[in-house]
Structures are given as C-alpha cells and as structure tokens.
Amino acid sequence: MPDDPQRRYEEVLALDTRLDAPERQGLTGTTRADVYEPTRDPDDVTVAPDGRSLDEQPRWRQDFAIDWPRDQHVARRDFARFLVLTSGAFTAGQAWIAAQSLVRERRPSPPRKRIAALADVPVRSAIVFDYPGELDPCLLIRLADGGVVAFSQKCTHLSCAVVPRIDQGVIQCPCHEGYFDLATGQNIAGPPPRPLPRIELEIVGGEVFAIGVHERTV
C-alpha cells in the first residue's frame, strides 16, 4: 500500500500519549509538545467578581493580582523596581555626602572668640559657652593637671546635652548612657558612634580663646 501522509498523521494523533503505552514502544518524537507542560491548578486561578478576564480588569486589579502565577510576576517586577529605586537612593546619598564635604571645605574658618579668663575656671571644674554660633553649646573643662580642653556639648548619638563627670574622668550623655573620655572626648561606651567635636583653644595672657572646631570620625 502506498504511503499516505494524511493517514499516517491521523494514526499519530490517535496514539496513546502515555509513556508506557504499547503503541509507543520503539517510537520517538510522536508525543504532542504540550503533553509535558505543567498544568495549572484550578485553585491557583480565580475569577474576578465581575467575571471579566484579567486583561479587561482595571489597572489596580492587574497590579494586585490574586492569581498565584500572576502574583509571582508582579513580585518579580516589584523587586526589580525596588532595586532600581534603592540604587538611585544610594547614588543620591553619595552625591549629597560629596556636596556636603565640598561645602565644609569651602566654609570659612570660625571666628576667634574669647571664652573666659583662665583664673575664672578652677581646676577640676567646667563652664558652658557657645561656639561657633549662639546655638552651639560647648564645654570648657579644667583638668586636674591644670590643662584646659573644650568639646561640643552635643552628643554624637542624638545631640543630647552631655554632662562632665570630672571626678569619674568622663563626659556622660544622660539620655542613653553614652560616655566620652574627659580629656580627649573619645567615645568609650554606649551608643555614641564617634568622638565629640573638639574646640581648638588658644591661651593668650591668661585668656582662653576658641579658634576653631575639629570634627572627628574616629
């Protein structure tokens, strides 16, 4: 009998697509392409209240899909959007830090300001003064050896006013129990992440002057 392509095609379509079917023994490439595709669980697919298809639904319902396959697609899209936004925020933050650093470098030096007469600050005592502005409280501390040091009074954690504990050799932040070394302003305990800004001093003729602010990170 001559080969009939149409008849052979119909016979192929009639084959049992199961792998263990006797008709498939010795045959290859006769199974339909969609046989091995995963089937969708009916429980994963829901129908909108109005009965319309997903393509006909409003945009908000498409963005907040309740079908599991669609929900996975939205999650991947939102994750990619999150990565883009995070990268943009990181770049903007770096640009802001660079701009602030440039501004600080070009900012004029603080003016020279008299704080007090050295004789008015007894050994193992402290006074408060403002520098470089009127809203920048600072501490002038007379150490046990007679030397003087000065630091910003704002804690480097959350800007609470710190208090010198001279007998203990520390400067304490009472808000969150942060501690700094009395002589150096170095952060030594608690949440403060960096030392207190040090006020640079100059003593001329028994008078103490503030001449600058040294911001420190370590």
Image (spheres, rainbow, N blue to C red):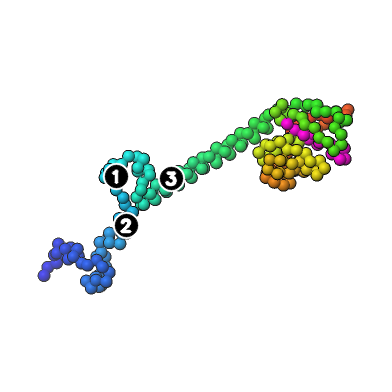
Range of the magenta residues?
137-150
The residue at the point 69 percent across, 46 percent down is: 190
Residue placed farthest to the left in the image? 1
Decide which of tag 2 and tag 3 comes sooner along the chain.
2
Q: Quadrant of the N terminus?
A: bottom left
Q: Which residue is mark 2?
A: 41
For residue 153, above or below residue 11: above
Q: Position of residue 75 (x, y in %)?
A: 42, 48
Label 3: element kind: helix
Q: Quadrant of the C terminus?
A: top right
Q: Which residue is mark 1?
A: 49
For residue 69, above or below residue 111: below
Q: Quadrant of residue 111?
A: top right
Q: Nearer the viewer, mark 2 or mark 1?
A: 1
Magenta span dominant secondary structure: strand
- Label 3 and label 1: CA atoms lie apart by 25 Å
